[in-house]
Image: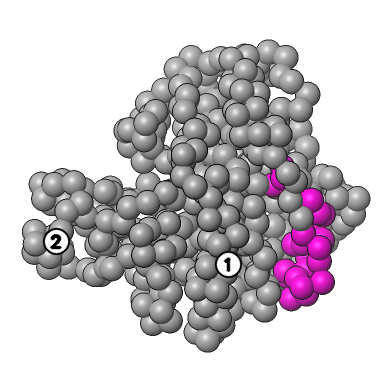
Amino acid sequence: MNILVIGNGGREHAIVHALKKSPRAGKIYAMKGNAGIGELAELVDVDYLDNKAVGDWLDAHPDVEYTVIAPDDPLALGLADELESRGHRVFGPSKRAAAIESSKAFAKELMKKYGIPTAKYEIFGDYEKALAYVKGAPLPVVLKADGLALGKGVLICRTEKEAEEGLKEIMLDKKFGRAGDKVVVEEFLEGPEVSVLAFTDGKTIVPMITSCDHKRAFDGDEGLNTGGMGTFSPAPFYGEKCAQEVMEKIMLPTMAAMNAEGRTFRGVLYFGLMKTKEGMKVIEYNSRFGDPETQVVLPMLKGDLLDIFEAVTDERLSEVKIGWEDGACVCVVLASGGYPVKYEKGKEIEIGEIDKDVVLYHAGTKRKDGKLVTDGGRVLGVCARGKTLEEARRKAYENVGKIRFDGMFYRKDIGIKYRDISKE
């Protein structure tokens, strides 16, 4: 079966890498892909944010039997609906279902309506009303741009002045564009965070192995929010008790809520969770695989990813066996100097001899004049598995040392979070 994968980051490289293992996978195309994906798939230079252009390309390539839509933007724009209307088989939720990520206001109202545990909040479309509210709100306070903002539209404000400046950035200065037309003002929750991705076809929901992301740019969770500077799997504090609580109080109710709203979700539903003193609570939903969580989750998968994808599309997920490897996995992201604000592209990347059991997932790379160069803020993800988290960390960082490009920086503390928190 020939497959088209939509997207061009580390997440998509991990998906293509996993799909290649399927005995049923034929030729893989990637739109637009990157240099690493180009070693496994044929790159297609079509703008995947143009629904018509993607549909026209697939119409002209009837040999492509299945399409995987990985990023959030095309899902929010209704690419899955467009392709399905043309008779193409697709992995990825509809536009109406993807609203669980594309509108934080919708997600919060959904949780409130159906009793799904989350932080207390208020929603504002008017700057002056939002400003008046935050002036009396308990500190710290969390501001979230309503729409998609590349994982960067969340501000934790520890003073009233920070909150006022944050509101101005989001609602008046439009730092995140139209995503800031509305803002969600949330109470600040405390506790360890965990990402739990789940396959769901609207009838069955199957959680994947847990992972922990590192959003801040620098060690010790300092600096600006990024798209993610590294991940590890599994979360050391997340045991059977947590898993049962999340399934009963969050996952199954969310699936049922989306069905009740006429927004049946078929694809990967991402639960960003926090373990608070009151129990597990939802911080955010995503309507697709996380990045860079996918880079540590898929290497641990026991099963055929293509079989799982098709079972979701066909609403027969309950028939597919899904398992997870023992041990741990760590991914360290190598970023361009200046990320996540301003950075230069086109820096030549030098890569030494990487260990055979370590995978380099390309995020922002391309080939130029025969050389591998940087082409984004996050450039590479160095991913290693081990029998223990410490072994996986050691392997990952040993291989980080074999890579260099001008301005390269990375966090040196990926994988040491939460080690002292007891598992429940």
- Residue 320 lies within the magenta run: yes
* Image spot of residue 249 (x, y percent): 50, 73
Q: Which of 49 and 162 is in front in this view?
A: 162
Left or right of 414 on screen, residue 12? right
Residue 416's disc is: none
Left or right of 164 on screen, residue 81? right
Residue 244's disc is: 1
Q: Which of 140 and 405 is in front in this view?
A: 140
Is label 1 in a helix, a strand or a loop?
helix
Q: Compared to 202, does 150 lie above or below?
A: above
Left or right of 40 on screen, residue 271? left
Amino acid found under the numbered disc labelled 2: Ala
Residue 144 shows in this picture: yes
What residue appears at the point 8 percent right and 59 percent down from the top-left corner? 135
What residue appears at the point 74 percent right and 51 percent down from the top-left corner? 324
Magenta highlight range = 298-322
